[in-house]
Amino acid sequence: MNTIPVIINDKKLDVDPGKTILEVCRENDIEMLTMCHLKGVMDIGACRLCLVEVEGANKLMSACTTRVNANMIVRTATDKIKRYQRITTELFFAERNHVCSVCVANGKCELQQLGYKVELDHIRYPHLFPQCEVDTSHPWYVMDHNRCIMCTRCVRVCTEVEGAHNWDVMNRGHQVRIISDFNTPWGESITCTSCGKCLHACPTGAIWPKAIVQGQLEKKPEMLSELMEKRKMKL
Amino acid sequence: MDKRRIFISPVTRIEGHANITIELDDDGNVQDALFHVNEFRGFEKFCEGRMYTEMPTITPRICGICPTSHTLASVKACEMIQGTQPTYTANLLRRLMHIGQNLSSHALSFFHLSSPDFLLGYDSDPAKRNILGIAEKYPDIAVKGIRLRKFGQELSERITGKKIHIMGIVPGGMAYPLTEENRKALLQWIPEATQTVQLGLSIIKRFHEENADMVNSFAPSPTLYLGTVGPNGEHELYDGKLRFMDADGSILNDQVSPTDYLNYIAERSVNWSYLKYPYYKPYGFDKGFYRVGPLARLNVASKMRTPLAQKEFEIFKSMNGGKPVHGTFYFHYTRLIEALSDVEDAERILNDPQVTSLHIQHHGRWNYDEGIGSSEAPRGTLFHHYKTDETGKLVKVNLLIATGQNNPSMNRSVLEVAKQYVKGDDIKEGMLNRVESAIRCYDPCLSCSTHAIGQMPMVIELTNKKGELIKRIERG
């Protein structure tokens, strides 16, 4: 296959055309922050953490949804990008009710790890403290909207991997919510297969099994990616 | 009558802030004293709507000193909802962690907060009447006290990886086992810990001998007592049944299941405090004051579980001819007897061949819509009571916490000490310290949560009826 040259952080790389900037960065050990990206399912550029500077573009581009072009010059770790990543992370924490100390995902949470990576020591924006529902209607799982960051990984995994499309999104802005079927309690869903893939896709403590408590949560998002890879294999 | 009031504001924080009002009559005699807790935390309310299984994680955050007791009461309530029981090894590990917390808390209370009064004197320079003053004058004692607390915290750390706000106590058992390496490391602490507790006992006994009048007259009013006991009436912290005792030592109710606590305990709100007033239901609000904590536990117990503690227990029991000892000051002595029992019991558990077993959890799920759990926190009996809907979501939470149960008695002890030491317009430093000391005997969260150097920030203002300031003493 023909390759194309790109320059990322002043380093020249020969890469396969058609790949996204994020894929190229990950393949070349260039650290990228992401929350909504889950390898194997469609990227939507929702979290805005993988923004990069592309020379010639008048705005920052999301690396997960931007494909590489020949001779593209990309910067991933400028001061501006780091500032934006910090702002984005602060807004995640300010929007809903994230209390790591009592969260079932404490120590196993991608949002918490993101906080450490951007050296989050305080939040400059007023917390919204919305009143969010905890949906406990499913016999095995809990959906806690307080901890949801609207990455929609659950929606995409449910649709693309399981094929059930139980999860979807309603409303806009900070009123936006993940819904089950047509906004019915999860336990009353007629599409959910109770497979638990959304649990493994969720990067925070928003979806978790009822059977466990803090310290016992094990999420395996890589298992979902492997599943998608296996499906591509020709037996 | 022209009433005058002394305001002590703030006393310090009990999971918030507290004030004291002392009312004087025209002649400067104390008429009344009110202990106000004027902060609201709202755990019972904001836990509604959460899954019941989250409670063992949320409720330890009520207190940084007794998180294990909260976790234990909480998991027991969860286990009642599930209909599960912890494994044998899980019970051992839970006991170990509870012992660790009790030991750590008692060491903090005695060596850090209270020993400056015993070793340096109530009227000594307040600037040095703290653990730093002890470190200066008695460095050996200060170090031993600090190390005893370290041992207590290490008991939790070596099982769950955390000293405070531990994780790993889960409905049905434990999430983490104890390794053989950690078991051996913990066992090495036992001789030193035993020696330190016995040092504490010698300090308090000497103080008793040298200050017998003060000790025996320090807020000595009789009350009822509540504590947890084993099947044969033995002293118990982790698991057992409730025993209520009257002021004369008659057992009012024995082997009461903690799940029946509402048949015996009621609560009433008062208009001067956010902290409710629990009371022994059969006796009513006016006569039903009861106390919990180490003094109560030893008053209600028939015996201790370990030999060295049993010897001290017999000395304690002989102080009032086998009847309950009411003097509030004896909280300190009983705290140390418990600490001795803790160290002995820790050794027994660490030598149990099953303590390192990997069979640590039974698994269950929601089966019942109500759960009640109790444990003996360092400050006394603690109840967690949850009601859920059919999905496991909490619809009602009631937390009856030890400091709350001691609240009416603390109020009365403050009044008694104020009557004894406050007179007229002349407020002396010694009076300030003795009012503080009456509260500290109960070791409520106000002495343990923030003021580790053993001195509460206090302002006492003496005003006339018009609110005009007559005198002000400030310390902080």
Image (cartoon, coloured by chain):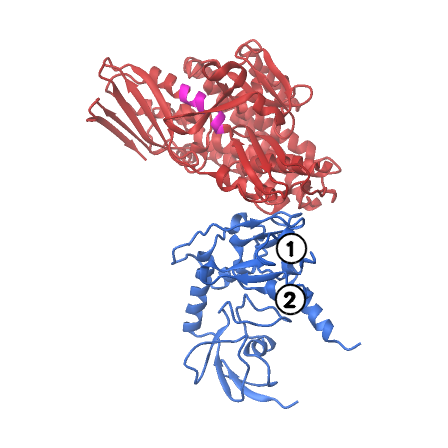
C-alpha distance separating marks 1 and 2: 14 Å
What amino acid does circle 2 point to? Thr
Query: Residue B263 falls in which quadrant of the image?
Result: top right
**B417 lies above or below B357:** above
| Colour-to-chain, blue | A
Place of residue B13 in the rendered image (x, y in percent of width and height, measured from the top left): 40, 35
Boundaries of the magenta span: B403-412
The residue pinned by badge 1 equals A189
Q: Residue at x 58, y 18 (%)?
A: B244
Nearest-to-viewer mark from 1 and 2: 1
Look at the image and tell me in which quarter the C terminus of chain A lies. Answer: bottom right
Q: Which mark is residue B382?
A: none
Q: Picture coordinates of residue A120 (x, y %)?
A: 45, 59
For the point 47% across and 25% down, which residue is it?
Answer: B442
Q: Nearer the viewer, residue A158 or A71?
A: A158
Q: Is residue B153 left or right of residue A97?
A: right
Kindly indicate which chain is depicted in red in the rendered structure: B
